[in-house]
Image: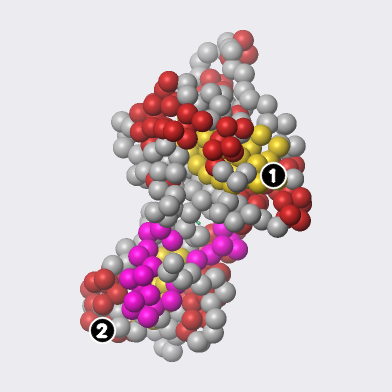
Amino acid sequence: MEGGELPWLLVNEIGGIRGILHSHVPFLKKHFHLITMKEFLENRKDVGKKVQAIYLWWHKPVIDKELLQSLPNLKVIANSGVGMDHLDLKLVASFGVKMANAPRAVSSSTADTGMALLLASARRLVEVHNISISQSMEYCEADILGVKVTGATLGIVGMGSIGYKIALRAKAFEMNILYHNRTRRKVQEEQAVGATYCKTIDSLLQQADFVMLVVSLTPQTHKLIGKRELELMKPTATLINISRGAVVDQEALVAALQSGVIGAAALDVTSPEPLPRDHPLLKLKNVIITPHLGIKTDKATYMITEEAVENILAALNGLPLPSEVLPS
Ligand SMILES: O=C(O)C(=O)CO
């Protein structure tokens, strides 16, 4: 690829499972000269000097010391999502490289995914769909009673922009909303969505019919929900995870679901992703698993690319990045 005066942007690949979407390429090409990892690896020395930015799509390419050392003019890495747990922020910053995520583009679609899982689990949509398309016509008589969402209590763990959008949606479903967050939201913000702050996660777990995990994965939230926490939940409660698989102790979750410690789980994220085909979670009737659907809508993914471009251009022009992420 030849690229006039445009800055060089490295992406993992174009298309494929871990590649940027074909439909985003014309927009990216307006601003950058695109280089794939394959092209970079074929001519590491010449290409490496030219790359000024990386756009990470679904956590790829992997950013390690070796790659950073091969890109002496790299200024910025933009991530196609909000979670940055796949990046060693301190390492990247030590190379003088700025980082940005895409919170504006992500929050609504991820909140929709959370609500979709809540509703699908409550009304056992996957189970009844499977019965409906099976040969058996006796499904009307089957004992498939769901959980009433209206009036039920939702506990949101993590009240950032995604958590708050979930609360907005849950309010429309007339749910009682509890939340736990490192810092309490302003009273006006709580009132706007009718959410009550729980100082401890334990009290939220004890009261909620649905617990929705929306925290970032950090050393503090790793296995935040383990055996003890699951045992605090109601035996009828549903755990919904749209954050990261490692926020939950998965072995403890399997045991809790098998023994009726909790009622059900709906998981958009697991550890690892995807789960091995023989994993016990895949065999449980009271579990719904989606493949990290998160932001995946046409509009949201396009907005993510727009947000990434905005951040990259700001960094290359020496301006403040709209969604800069700093190492903590
Ligand atoms: O934004 C992210 O990090 C996501 O995982 C969205 O699902």
Secondary structure of the residue carrying numbered label 1: strand
Q: Is residue 212 left or right of residue 37?
A: right
Q: Is residue 280 left or right of residue 81?
A: left
Question: What residue is rendered at 58% in x and 12% in y?
Answer: 142
Identify which residue, 77 or 48, lies in the foreground: 77
Residue 245 showing in the rendered view:
no
Most distant residue in the bottom direction: 5
The percent coordinates of residue 305 (x first, y second) are: 52, 67
Image: magenta residue range: 84-108
Magenta span includes 105: yes
Amino acid under disc 1: Thr
Q: Which residue is mark 1?
A: 196
Could you say which quadrant of the image residue 183 lies in? bottom right
Secondary structure of the residue carrying numbered label 2: helix
Residue 149 showing in the rendered view:
yes
Disc 1 to disc 2, C-alpha distance = 57 Å
Q: Which residue is mark 2?
A: 46
Question: Which quadrant: the N terminus?
Answer: bottom left
The percent coordinates of residue 113 (x first, y second) are: 57, 45
Give the mark nearer the N terminus: 1 vs 2.
2
Amino acid under disc 2: Asp
Question: Which quadrant: the C terminus?
Answer: bottom left
Up-down relation of residue 86 to residue 281 (above or below): below
Identify which residue, 306 or 325, lies in the foreground: 325
Identify which residue, 279 or 191, lies in the foreground: 191
Magenta span includes 255: no
Which one is closest to the eye, mark 1 or mark 2?
Answer: 1
Question: What residue is rendered at 72% in x and 31% in y?
Answer: 150
The percent coordinates of residue 288 (x first, y second) are: 49, 33
